[in-house]
Amino acid sequence: MPPSSTSGPTASVRGRGRFGWWWVLGALGLLALAVRLAPWRAAFTPTGITFLVDTDPHYHVMRAQRILSDLGQVPLFDGGMNYPYGTRILWPPLFDYLIAVPAWMLGGTTQDLYRVAAVLSPVLGAVTVVLVAVLAASVLGRRAGLLAGLLVALLPLHATFTVVGRPDQHSAELLLCTWAFAAFAAGLRSDDAGRSPWGPAVSMGAALALSFWNWQGSALYLLVPSVFVAAWWVVGPEPQSRRAARTLARAAVTGAGLLAVSLAVLLPGEIALLSGKGVTGFHVLLLAAVASFAGGLGWLGWLGTRRGQTSLRRRLLEALLAAAVPAALALWVGRAGFATNLAALGAANRWYETISEFWPLFGRGWYPLERNLRHVLATYGLTLFFMPLAGLSLLARWRRERSAQLAFVLAWGLVLLVMTLVRRRIGEYLLVPMVLWVAAALDALPAWLGARPGKLAAILAPAAPFLGALLLLAPVLPTLTVDPPAPDRDGDLREPMALLRGEAPRPGREAVLSVWSAGHFIRFFGGRPVVTSPFGVDGGDEAMRDAARFFLARDERAAEEVLRERHVGYVLLKHPGSEVYVLSGFAPPSGPAPVEVRHDWYGGDRYDIRPAFWDLVPSRLYFLDGGASAATGALGGFRLVYESPPDRPDLRNAEQYKMFETVAGAALVVAGLSPNARVVATVQVVTHQGRRFAWETSAVADGSGEATLRVPYATGRGTHVAAGPVLVTDGERRAVVPVPEEAVVEGRRVPVSLGGVPRE
């Protein structure tokens, strides 16, 4: 349907023709920008620019900084992850260049980089809103375009991904996806006489090529039009189905060509790779497979027409045959790349299991059902719940108009609705077809009310679409006036990260082993390499497995062996229950599971801590500060150097960070003991939070009457933790021993003579 083919009340939205419509689009863009800039004070703080929501923005900014410092070179490998081995970077570089290039044009300073990064996503979000409005207007009419743009501008489902201070490739994902699908919809128009049939296809191909430069999972953008083309080939009218297949084939050929040429020029070594990480020849292969499918479909259809074979069974066979051959070849040739993408889509391991974006929208997850519902209402408003009724309304309209564009919008929404119910990460992509469905239904209200008897219906008819939109947005409208605090989950890590950055790394002890969620934050603020990171299983071979060896270790020597292999100088912990559960999936089973999960669809899944958990090295560090328990000895190779304030009095349920330095430990050698005599060493420790604890270890004298006590604390005051001298006693005699720093760091012997201090 042409944009001008609107009727009735829709004309009121046109204003004064095309000029008035551009004013409407401009107003939508400004509204979207205002909503996304509302938390300005949370990002632009008196102490500097803060990046919000999670730690992925920190890695994007850090990579953009590398691009500036390396004179535009594309960083494909990160030696600071999976340390000391490094790993390929999961993300393609386009989004990081969108930060780096404008920052370079502004002067190239760190502040320029941070400012550009903070405002980039709101700008991309506003452009997306305008593009959605244009798409909706071209398919459904301008009033529907206004309604669709209004919904995207105000719904948190999109606003949270494009808020100020959140430089993340998510903000470019929906823009490029909408561009690609809008171009495909334009290629389906039945009134394209006099237009170049290649125009929409080239536009779609360019969007697909850029999509793969932005996000490695952009194969999703190929799925929806491919499913539609296959289904439409079977059930759609022949001219329309052929046009759809031709458009997709031309777009995929264009995209494959553009991607191959850009790779050959910019990253010539990558085109020969078939990895799912970054942008490689694997993504060219995907585009080529789609081109082969759509082109093969057209050829088979032409062959069938020549033979007079156009039955439903014949078209179904053509669709299956055209899809089977390129799909089989692509799966066989690009199996390594498919493994990366399908592992994420299928949440194929425990790491994915604990990440909310890979949970079902309403199914089993870590949140109670009531919290899940509140989350959906706060994210989608009532639009998601209205979507089935809107889909029926759109289906009725398609039956009247038989438009291929309407059929595509229906298929687009249906495919992504099913995928979103399975993986809430897809909800970002459901947004556009969802608002198209909803806008179409709201746009039909004036005609429906106009046919009702009574003056009230006639009065309400013109305003009904906008009143309906406000009703659907009601659950989210109160949040639009709130300037929220920075949702920086790891804000209390800035202090220990400053401690790390201020110290020269010890050779062979440069890295930090932490909970995986803090990896990007440590890289950005601490300037230290890490073993695991928010890239999870894609953050380097063996990174999760070696982390599992540490987090599941019961023996101090086994834990320290992992740290030596990984050159770890610091261990950063928060409550280790979640980390132990996740990493248990990357280690061979050995005895009872320390942590299991009780699955509860209604009340939310819960961790079930088992007795074996308390014997693990990380648990003893976190809960006992590395001291001895009734069943285990002290850990002499770790000293506490920082702790954040606990968020609740009960440490066993608190979310508190603790950072330990790995040290050789001073060897306090006590002579003159009776054989098999027990000797105890105690250190009084005070943290900067005012918490006091006694770290204690013990040893038994050998046959010569000598015992060695390994102590990780030097006497004196550190930056955040102070330790007193060591009190050594065999029960009858005692000695107070000051321990020098170099003895702790280098593992030197410190002779101890008991009896010098009388027992009190």
Image (spheres, rainbow, N blue to C red):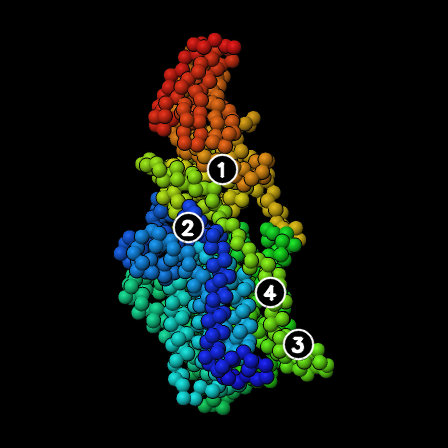
User: Pointer 2 and pointer 4: residues touching (CB < 8 Å)?
Assistant: no
The residue at which mark 4 appears reads as 473
The crowd level at tag 4 (other Cα within 10 Å; few <14, some 14-19, many 20+) is many
Q: Residue, x 49% and y 17% (percent of image)?
A: 678
User: Pointer 4 and pointer 3: residues touching (CB < 8 Å)?
Assistant: no
In three-dimensional space, the C-alpha distance between marks 3 and 2, rounded to whole angstroms, equals: 47 Å
Q: Residue, x 38% and y 42% (percent of image)?
A: 526
**Under tag 3, what secondary structure?**
helix
Label at residue 644:
1
Label at residue 279:
none
User: Pointer 1 and pointer 2: residues touching (CB < 8 Å)?
Assistant: no
The residue at which mark 2 appears reads as 49
Which mark's residue is nearer the viewer, 3 or 2? 3
In three-dimensional space, the C-alpha distance between marks 1 and 3, rounded to whole angstroms, equals: 57 Å
How many discs mark residues in the rendered view?
4
Question: Which of the marked residues, 4 or 3, is nearer the chain's N terminus?
Answer: 3
Q: Is residue 131 above or below residue 162?
A: below
Instruction: Residue at the far right: name it.
Output: 454
Q: Amino acid at mark 3?
A: Leu
Question: Which of the marked residues, 4 or 1, is nearer the chain's N terminus?
Answer: 4
Q: Amino acid at mark 2?
A: Ile
In three-dimensional space, the C-alpha distance between marks 4 and 1, rounded to whole angstroms, equals: 39 Å
| Place of residue 117 in the rendered image (x, y in percent of width and height, measured from the top left) | 39, 56
